[in-house]
Image (spheres, rainbow, N blue to C red):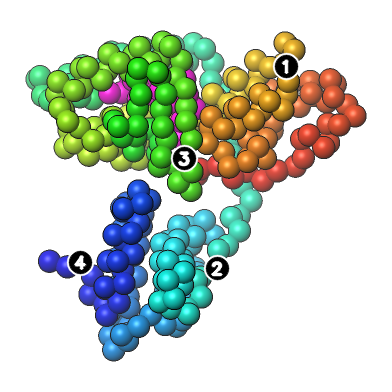
Amino acid sequence: MNQFRSNITPLIEQFIRYRKASGSWNETCYGLNIKLFDHFCANHYPENTELTQEMVDTWCTKRDTETNFSYDTRTMVVRTFVDYLRTRNLTSVLPPATLKPEPRIYIPHPFEADELQRFFHECDSIQTYLGRKASIIRKLTVPIFFRLLYSSGLRTTEARLLRTENVDLKHGVVDIQQSKGYDQHYVVLHDTMNSLMQRYNRAISSLQPGRTYFFPSYKRSHYSRDWVQDNFRALWDKANGSGTTTVAYDLRHNYATVNINNWIDGGFEFSDKLNYLSKSMGHRSVEATRYYYSIVPRLADTLKEKTEKGFNDIVPEVIYDEEK
């Protein structure tokens, strides 16, 4: 049964086929919102056989309950859909505007070594339930999944959507093809992490042969965002109590700050190392990586002391533009 009901259904389906073929379709966000837009068009413009500016503008009007960020998230697929049609001369409708996110300050949790040690101990201590396959998969996956985030700085989404074909365990290289903005980049694994990934791969392959995702769920799909955060919070609270607002994404911040802190006391070519870190973390520009200066203890003062003359040129004020 067709999930779309409006008269522009053929265009929507064409757009979805294109995005899926190019590996840039997010069903969780895009799929839901394009369906809501289609139903809106069917209900309010049942006679329209073509997309109109009024249809787009009316549905994309910011709602009183929305922040700029949630508005952009809801309307992103319509914006992308309109751009797709315009580049093919299938419409003259203008896409909805994007809104600048409201200023916000998020301070990631500063991990202590003993906190991380206790957390990973809990990851390694997961018990299976009555030998059920789902619990066995969870016991295998959780310790490796969170160690990968910790040791590589991957975004949680990148790890969740990581496909088996994009993991080269022979050379220890991960090809990140689905990322923020769908920018492809490569991550080289530490030897110890690569060894753990090899062991995990052998074990999970016996349970899920021919799997698509490197970290498959019991149903052979990728894990959800809720799975990541629910497991992280349950294990973190068990290991360290529930007095912090720590989230799994903080492991990425930790990766960046630990690397940058290691530059302080030794000699280094600052621009080279910053560029390497930026590429590894999948930032579109070095400017995005400079955000971490504001959360790294002592780094800004140390760099100013060592490079007083050009400090302001090297470290300008930047806006935080990481994954929410």
Q: Between disc 3 and disc 2, whose residue precedes?
A: 2
Spot occupied by residue 201 in the image (x, y as percentages of width and height) = 25, 20
Looking at the rendered structure, which numbered label has been put on residue 3?
4
Looking at the rendered structure, which numbered label has been put on residue 97?
2
Spot occupied by residue 56 in the image (x, y as percentages of width and height) = 43, 76
The image quadrant where one finds the N terminus is: bottom left
Frontmost of labels 1 and 4 is 1
Instruction: Report the Cα–Cα distance between label 2 and label 1.
Output: 43 Å
Q: Between disc 4 and disc 3, whose residue precedes?
A: 4
Q: Residue at x 34, y 14 (%)?
A: 196
Q: Quadrant of residue 293?
A: top right
Secondary-structure class at tag 4: loop
Q: Between disc 1 and disc 4, whose residue precedes?
A: 4
Depth check, front residue: 243 or 288:
288
Instruction: Report the Cα–Cα distance between label 3 and label 2.
Output: 26 Å
Q: What amino acid is labelled 3 in the image?
A: Gln
Q: What amino acid is labelled 1 in the image?
A: Phe
